[in-house]
Amino acid sequence: MKIDSAESYIESMRELKRKIYLLGDRVDNAVDHPMIRPSMNAMAETYNVGDEADAADLLFCESHLGGGRISRFTHIHQDTDDLVNKVLMQRLLGRRTSTCFQRCVGMDGFNALYSVTHECDQEHGTEYHERLKEYLRFVQEENVVVDGAMTDVKGDRNLRPSEQADPDLFVHVVERRPDGIVVRGAKAHQTGALNSHEILVMPTTAMREDEGDYAVSFAVPATAPGITFVLGRQPSDTRKMEGSPMDVGNPGYGSQEALIIFDDVFIPWERVFMCGEVDQSGKVVERFASYHRQSYGGCKVGVGDVLIGAAQLAAAYQGVERASHVRDKITEMIHLNETLFSCGIACSSRGAATPSGCYMVDPLLANVCKHNVTRFPFEISRLLQDIAGGLVVTMPSEKDFENPEVAPYLEKYLQGKDGVTTRDRMKIIKFIENMTMGCGAAAYLTESIHGAGSPQAQRIMISRLGNLPEKVQYAKRLAGIES
């Protein structure tokens, strides 16, 4: 049955039987686990039309495969308007949740594979593109969540995949059968993996001729035998277990990452989209990276909008909203946030069609977008903490506010501006703590550094795509240098 609402999405998660571990224990009911449910709630928002004026047109679009109206998260970009609307959708959802809503990696993955499989078929006579289109019809018709899995655990970073002491440190094919392949390995930092119905695996780097077993891409149900999920820890994550919503900061929403272990997992050929074509592996990596670096010009900007609002609210609650230095800091936060947004829109607007018909972002500007994201959210967070004050790290817990002996003192001595309840002031302070130091910081700050590749990865691409020889010629011409 097609998932058509946030509620039906949550119910679909109840039906999935998977091997999940968290804090050393096996988790049988992930949906109702207090450390997991907030991340599912954030994912559920991708199914929620909401009441924003433009939400429906951003969240949904027409399938080019003839499937009617579909979720944009399952769509193949058909023009630059699609690329722009993707960024606008991500900003909208960032504003709703103030966290990672986790569905972008799969979308970026199958858009990258769409063009590469088309070109691979042209060059090698394979049938990957039709397989991928058939898979996409299923994804669109059922409106399932696809986790995009690219990052291998990598072992010794100084060694190639084929040079590792343990070959399983990169996902690879261990057996080829008439009906499919068997794979082994692990994918790390998998945002939203536990909240996904499907896993789309891609190679993590450009492979060499002797690394054909590592040049593999496929889709597999999250419930497939041999797959294990081990959830990662986040700062202050066990606060979600304490029954104190204020201490969590953003109790309704969150993000979650997992290590996905593939222990001899069988994949039928109809779900294999690359198997040994080493010359195609690098293209998948670069195109996926460009799409995903574009994404950060939307999702992180939406979260930034919330943090700017939190800064203004905290200042008002403390009676300093008119102070010139506070106004200046909030203006700087807005400037930095809109700069990120401008980069996301720019790389989208300058996109171009690939031979497959799928539209690709401008890769140089997409890398510039993500490189700015590795810096600006940290300055936005610094300014937010500056405005919020020291209570971000010294405020008592919600349990203290509920203790009849000390609560009157807390209400009296932690109050701010007249007319603002102490509890409301504390709620926004705890929210700021969460977003800049707690679980929320993982989705906003750490993800801004390492999501879609580390800063050095963007610098390499910017250097490669910057066309320095052409710029030298501009200078020579104007300076009258003929040599």
Image (tube, rainbow, N blue to C red):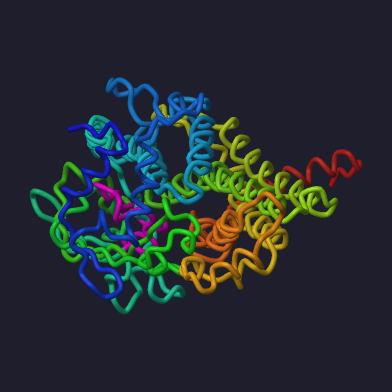
| Res 454 seen here | no
Q: Is 362 rendered above or below residue 285?
A: above
| Residue 129 left/right relative to 407 | left
Residue at image x 55%, y 61%?
A: 430
Point out residue 407 in the picture as x, y percentages from the top left corner: 54, 68
The residue positioned 33% from the left and 58% from the top of the image is 36
**Position of residue 103 measured from the top left corner of the image (x, y, whole percent):** 38, 45
Q: Nearer the viewer, residue 266 or 281?
A: 266
Residue 164 or 425: which is nearer the viewer?
425
Q: Is residue 12 magenta?
A: no
Q: Position of residue 198 (x, y in %)?
A: 25, 47
Whether residue 241 is situated above or below residue 122 in the rendered picture: below
Q: Is residue 64 above or below residue 127?
A: above
Where residue 105 sits in the image (x, y, percent)?
A: 40, 47
Residue 460: quadrant of the picture: bottom right
Q: Judge whether residue 470 can be spotted in this image.
A: yes
Residue at the image point whose x is 23% and y is 48% from the top? 13
Camera-nearest residue between 218 and 479: 218
Q: In the rendered image, which quarter is residue 160 located in?
A: bottom left
In the picture, the quarter occupied by the N terminus is: top left
The extreme bottom residue here reads 165
Q: How many marks are shown on the rendered structure?
A: 0
Q: Residue furthest right?
A: 480
At horizontal 26% and vertical 75% (from top left) the residue drawn is 24
Q: Which residue range is magenta in the image?
A: 187-211
**Left or right of 165: which side holds 419?**
right
